[in-house]
Each structure stands twice: as C-alpha cells, then as structure tokens.
Image: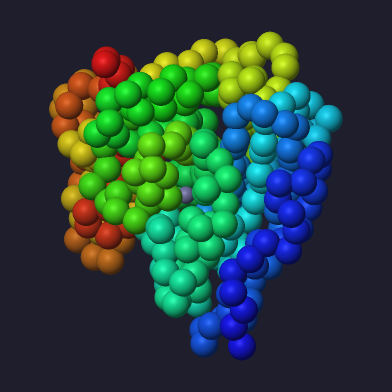
Amino acid sequence: MSHAPRLTFDIGAPGLSTGHLVVAGGTDCETLSLPVFSLNKGRGPRLLITGGNHGNELEGPIVARRLAEWLPDAQTCGKIIIVPEINPLAVRAWTRNTPVDGKNLNREFPGRADGSVTERIAHTISHLLLPEVDTVFDLHSFGPTWDFPPAVITHPIADADLMRKTVKMAEAFKLPITLIWEHDDTPGMFDTWVHEQGKLFICAELGGSTVGAEALAIYETGLRNALIALGLVEGKAEYPNFRHQKSAQTLETLLSDQVKSPVAGIFEPRCSIFDQIKQGDVIGVLHPMDSLRYRPVEVLAPTTALVCGISSGMHVEAGTEVVMLARPYTV
Ligand SMILES: [Zn+2]
C-alpha cells in the first residue's frame, strides 16, 4: 500500500514544531516516517541539517539530535529544519547503502517518486524539504575503516561564486581540516543536486573508527561555529581542540592523491595523519595473506604531500584506496 510523500505537520509554524517526513511505501518497503524538527524564528537564513545519509556513520544522527535539544533556545532568527536520520533502513543495518535495494542514497538525488525505496527517500527530501531552505549541512563521517581528521569538505564546483561562498562557509566551521576534494563519482550526490540549484551545501566528515566523545564534541563545536557564521545563533566561534591543538587548515586532494593498494591483503600504515611525506617515502606495507610465499609489498608516496587519511580497518582488494594525500589549497 502506498501513500503520497508528505509532512505530517506544518513545517512553517512559528517556534519549534515536530512531526514526520513520510516516504511513500512501495513493493520493496513499507512507508517510512522520518522524525523532523522544525524551528522557525522569523526572517533570516533557512538551513536544513541532515544526518544518517550513510548508515554506518553515526556521529551525524547523534549530533543532529543534540542540536535539536539546545537550538530551540539558542536560535535567534531564520529557519532550521533538522532530520537526524534520512536513511533509517541503512542506519538500522549499520551499512553505507540501503540494504533493501543496495543503493547509495548519496548517489540517488534527486530521486524518483516511483523508484526503489532509496530513490523515493531522495525524491521526498528533494521535493518537500529542499524548497524550504537555502543551505544544507549534511553530516557524514569516514566510517569505521578510516583514520581521518574532523573535516568539512566540498567537491570543486563549476560556479566560481558558489565555490567561493561554499569554501567560506566550510571554513567557518573552524574544524582542523577544510578539504577541497576532487572526486570522480559525483552524479546523484546530494551535494551536486543542491549545488545545481545554486544553494550552499556543506558536507561535514568526522573522523573514522568508532564514535567517540572527543569527535562528537568537535563536531558539535564546528556546527555551532557555522550557525554563528550564518547568523542563526549568537556567540563567539572557537576552534575545537583536536589532538591537543586548536588549528585549522584548508587543503585540496586530487584524484592523483589517492594512494591505492597494489595487491589484495591487509594494509599496515607506516605514516600517521598530518605527516609530511616526500615522494618515494614508504608510507605503508601491504601484506598478502593468502600465499605461503609471504612477501610484503611496499607502498610508496607518489608525491610530496600531507597525509590526510588512512584506511587500515579492513582487508582490501587491489586498487582500494588506502591513503589519501592532500596539499594546501590555493585559490
Ligand atoms: Zn558518508
């Protein structure tokens, strides 16, 4: 049985109102009801905050719920819509993609009304929430296999003016890294769809490994800084404390900065994030585990750069990215 996508409440009502965003059911899945917090304080910026786009990145849903607790008192103007979990099926399964149809929600925008459940989620957000806002903060993290510093990222945007505004907004989070990330898999991204409408889209990527108190505190501080920069909250922005430092740098990573595993096996890193490495340095070793003729394979730095991320939490196939390099971003 199918119902049209809809909101169960008046999202424009003054003050705090709550209800559900209903994603229509289909042959693959029953109707989904996503909890929504809507905060209206009159004229001003209009912001959508989403978490749980990928189901194994749990910092976003947690921090979004935390924001929903203190924002009703702190917000001074404008409109903020919070949807802590836009893909509850993936979050329940603790998977990146939706288990029902195997699709990556972040490659399905703007979605389809008559598509599979992931496409229907994208379509519902695109049509019922995006028209309400000018800016989107989508809260991701690097998941359990990566060591990655707290970062705000954007992919290069063809529209130079939107790119400049996006980098400025990203830097306002004051997280340790603002990363301009060249990517070859952008069609269907939430980012791309929002950018095509000339709106600001910020993707926060918070560290890897397990969900930790330090990471959550950094994430929340970063979001508060961004809300101050937008003018939605009063206060003084502050750099979060990360590994005993309060600092921020803007970097870019190119497709050629992806260091990939030469063979299948287990990756042993020989570098740490923020290490400065030189071309030819041994930055890790790949251990093929399926042969008695055990011979570790050295992984060499392809270029002189900064280590930005390390993936060592899983057995990898040949060609899997194991280290991400970056360099200072210059406009
Ligand atoms: Zn993600």
User: Quick check: 212 left or right of 298?
Assistant: right
Q: Provide residue 100's location: percent of width, then percent of height.
A: 50, 77
Taking depth in this image into account, of 56 and 221 the one nearest to the observer is 221
Above or below, 137 relative to 286: above
| Residue 148 visible, this orientation | no
Occupied quadrant, residue 47: top right
Taking depth in this image into account, of 208 and 157 the one nearest to the observer is 157
Taking depth in this image into account, of 200 and 300 the one nearest to the observer is 200
| Residue at image location 27% in from the left, 60% down from the top | 317
| Residue at image location 43% in from the left, 37% down from the top | 199
Occupied quadrant, residue 63: top right
Q: Specify how the rendered protein is coloured.
A: rainbow
The N terminus: image quadrant: bottom right
| Residue at image location 64% in from the left, 14% down from the top | 237
Above or below, 319 relative to 180: below
Q: Provide residue 246's location: percent of width, then percent of height.
A: 57, 13
User: Quick check: 158 left or right of 49?
Assistant: left
Above or below, 9 relative to 280: below
The C terminus: image quadrant: top left
| Residue at image location 49% in from the left, 69% down from the top | 120
| Residue 3 visible, this orientation | yes
Occupied quadrant, residue 74: top right
Q: Provide residue 210's location: percent of width, then percent of height.
A: 60, 46
Q: Provide residue 82's location: percent of width, then percent of height.
A: 66, 45
